[in-house]
Image (cartoon, rainbow, N blue to C red):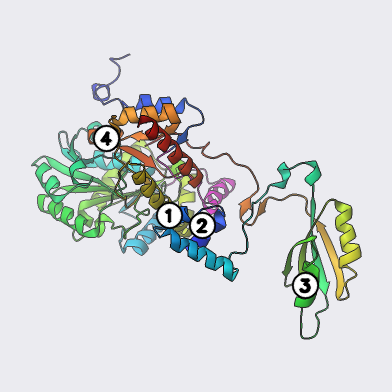
Amino acid sequence: MKNIVSKKVQIMQPSGIRVFFDLVLGMRDVISLGVGEPDFVTPWQIREAGIYSLEEGFTSYTSNKGLYKLRLGVRRHLKDKYALEYCPDEEILITVGVSEGVDLAMRAIINPGDKIIVPLPSYVSYGPVVELAGGVPVYIDTSGSGFKLTPELLRKNIDSRTKAVVLNYPVNPTGVSYRRRELEDINKILLNKGVFCITDEVYGDLTYDFNHTAFPTLPGARKNTVYLNGFSKSFAMTGWRVGFACGPKEIIAAMTKIHQYTIMCVPITGQMAAAEALASGRKSVEQMKREYNRRRLFMVEELNSLGLKCSCPQGAFYIFPSIKNSGLSSMEFSRRLLKEQKVAVVPGTAFGPCGEGYIRISYASSFDNLKEALARIRKFLEKRG
Amino acid sequence: MDEILEILEKDGRASAEDIAKMLRKDAGEVKKAIKKYEKEGAILKYKAVINRDLIRDEDFEVRALIEVNIVPQKDLGFDKIAERIYSFPEVTSCYLISGTYDLLVVVAGKNLHTVSNFVAEKLSCLEHVRGTATHFLLKKYKEDGVILKHKSENNKRIAISY
């Protein structure tokens, strides 16, 4: 069968982490700090809207761009939250989560050989999606600058073939985020060098220490940016698979073209539920955020006291502590922690080679679970001496 | 509401040290604040929420919601007669309500008889009580924001994901 599979897919990096993931999935009674989704279920009024839409018989296609009322909801939401205006007719597209948005954006802009900058460590899909679209990912190691993309790093990596940069903040896996001033510096370089921006801000609502800045709100950025967001993390709606893309109408039109041939439209039940989320879900988001924030502060303090050094992440629900003191590689540390104490974490290398020496800990888990996991990690470290 | 109270309302066993870490405060300060709340009566007590469906036989207990119509007393209104009612140990909750009845009283007893006896022999014969309507509780679904169903955690999420 090997010859049937396209060369492009054959050479795609098989995720080395898969073996470790399978190990976790095969074990029982594991406390997992390796989950990349909220531990809350979707707030009831949102689930209820989905159920109600089914009862009412909303089971058809929607327009390719998505339900108009949902696009209107997105428009209002961005206007209220960031004073950012997009036209629901031409500048907003409802996507199957941010994942589809990333794929569409890449395919809409990449010509063969175009370079796309991907700061590492990062969420796993950007690079492979760039490759599938015929582009060349240019990875930037940010481990030397507190896991942040600095203007110097960015400038150094731009050349005449650079088409775009992918930003994702707050960052999965590090929880790092950027203040407005830092983003302004990045934006200036992009505008100056004619490099486009694809910004994945799915964790934007979960920013704790300062206000989140939506990239298109920066001076001149709106026409140079595709803004991607979704309902998964803020509203605890991962399984519904609903996201949205906003940008200049030419780009959204191009993305819609691909979307209409490949996806047609996002499932209507999810769109109905998402519309309700925007209409009435803000309070639930704030409640969940407060809860995450308490866990964040608690975990950072505890991990540091265990000797797993970490700076305090500003967003998402991840902490990225260093395990270099253990003398083990990220993978080995994670494997042993799983085997010996039944605690699952994700090795930092899952998010790029520069994640070596780190693990990703998700605090999207109940407080009791977090405490138990910490106790087990303590035992693990004590045994190692 | 103060976040300390918000945390304690969800988990009465949260220690001052843990709360301090969660809120990035000094543990001594948190302890002091909790003491103050306790002293003022803002925090009245700490207790477990028990799912009685899982406790069998000897602890079997029936509960009834009893609507009580009363004649308010001059100068004292409803408060005095309410006090006479809620002081009975059988009464677990007591509310003044608007509508056809004046008080909503929750009564717990070993069985139907003990509860009915309480209503017939104690409650109804009180001087200012004009009438009662007793509703026996058949099933409890949710109490004080807690859904009374044991749910094992995390079984719906896959154990590891990006």
Report the side of A49 relative to B92 (left or right): left
Q: Residue at x 34, y 37 (%)?
A: A261
Secondary structure type for disc 4: loop
Q: Which residue is mark 2?
A: B7
Contact? badges 2 and 3 (CB < 8 Å):
no
Which residues fall within the magenta stretch? A33-62
Q: Position of residue B143 (x, y in %)?
A: 66, 54
Real-space Cα separation, disc 2 to disc 3, in angstroms? 32 Å
Q: Which residue is mark 4?
A: A357
Sequence-earlier tag: 2 or 3: 2
Q: Position of residue B125 (x, y in %)?
A: 90, 70
User: Residue A325 falls in which quadrant of the image?
Assistant: top left
Contact? badges 4 and 2 (CB < 8 Å):
no
Real-space Cα separation, disc 4 to disc 2, in angstroms? 34 Å
Real-space Cα separation, disc 1 to disc 4, in angstroms? 27 Å
Asked if badges 2 and 3 are on one and the same chain, I answer: yes
Q: Residues within 10 Å of mark 4 (few under 14, many from 20)?
A: many
User: Residue A318 falls in which quadrant of the image?
Assistant: top left
Asked if badges 3 and 1 are on one and the same chain, I answer: yes
Chain of the residue under the numbered disc 4 shown in the image: A
| In the image, residue B48 above or below residue A82 | above
Sequence-earlier tag: 3 or 1: 1
Amino acid at pointer 4? Gly
Secondary structure type for disc 2: helix
Real-space Cα separation, disc 1 to disc 2, in angstroms? 10 Å
Tell me the number on the disc at residue B22.
Answer: 1
**Which of B114 and B98 lies nearest the eye of the viewer?**
B114
